[in-house]
Amino acid sequence: MKIGIVGGTGDIGEGMAMRLSPQFDVIVGSREKEKAEATCEFGIEALKKRGQKCSLTGVSNQAAVDSADIVILAIPFKHLLGTLETLHGFEGKIVISPVNPMEKRDFFTFVPPQEGSAALLLKKLLPPTAKICTAFNSIAANRWKLLDEELDYSVPVCSDDAEAKQQVIGIVNRISKLHAFDAGPLAASYLVESLTPLLLNIARYNKMKDVGIQFH
């Protein structure tokens, strides 16, 4: 299975690539191919030091979409529309959105688009055959890159496509100690996306770090 990461050189994308690449063929995309290649070289070396083999390839964002079976959009919400305007080829692909529309004001707050969530905006922007899944939204960015630490979070997954949802749940459950949960249809994605500003506020006001969620 080939997983492409659009925005794979950002904090979240780079960490995701290193966590996924020991088990999947990961294609790291960037606006600058050279930056993606450098990210992959760093990731390969970091995993090699830990005795792990991996599959990492650095390409452009468009090449990441073209080559992948599953595409992860590891980009901030403010760049979502601009990035998608430069890309095509999502037809028939599973598209994973960890995108959270939020702003830092006096506190972190959820600021959804008119559609109600980033996921529903994607549904509007992408081809009808794209299978959109919301996942990975509430994992702190820097935790992805701390390879010596386990990720022991719960991961809600939303989608209108039952088969795609199960595939994404299967991927989540193969990463560290993550545990995926079916969180309903894509329309419920706003509930998942709004968790991140909540967690950031809890971390800020309680002097905590990397706050996550677990369902028991």
Image (cartoon, rainbow, N blue to C red):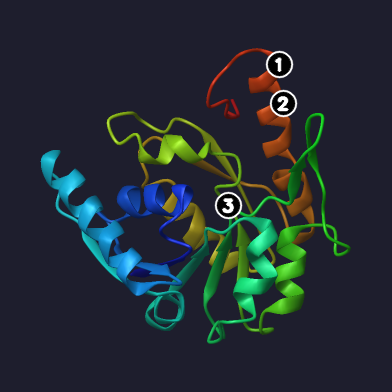
Report if the CB atoms under discs 1 and 2 are less than 8 Å apart: yes
Separation of residues labelled 1 and 2 (CA atoms): 6 Å
In the picture of the structure, the residue carrying the numbered disc 2 is: 201
Disc on res. 135: 3
In the picture of the structure, the residue carrying the numbered disc 1 is: 205
From the viewer's perspective, is 179 left or right of 54? right
Q: What amino acid type should be assigned to the residue bearing mark 2?
A: Asn
User: What residue is drawn where x is 77% and y is 45%?
Assistant: 191
> SS for tag 1?
helix
Q: What amino acid type should be assigned to the residue bearing mark 1?
A: Tyr
Above or below: residue 211 compared with residue 188: above
Q: In which quarter of the image is residue 91?
A: bottom right
Q: Nearer the viewer, mark 3 or mark 2?
A: 2
Question: Picture coordinates of residue 120 (x, y %)?
Answer: 76, 65
> SS for tag 3?
loop
Question: Picture coordinates of residue 83 (x, y %)?
Answer: 60, 72
From the viewer's perspective, is 34 left or right of 166? left
Residue sitting nearer the eye, 188 or 74: 74
User: What residue is drawn where x is 72% and y is 26%?
Assistant: 201
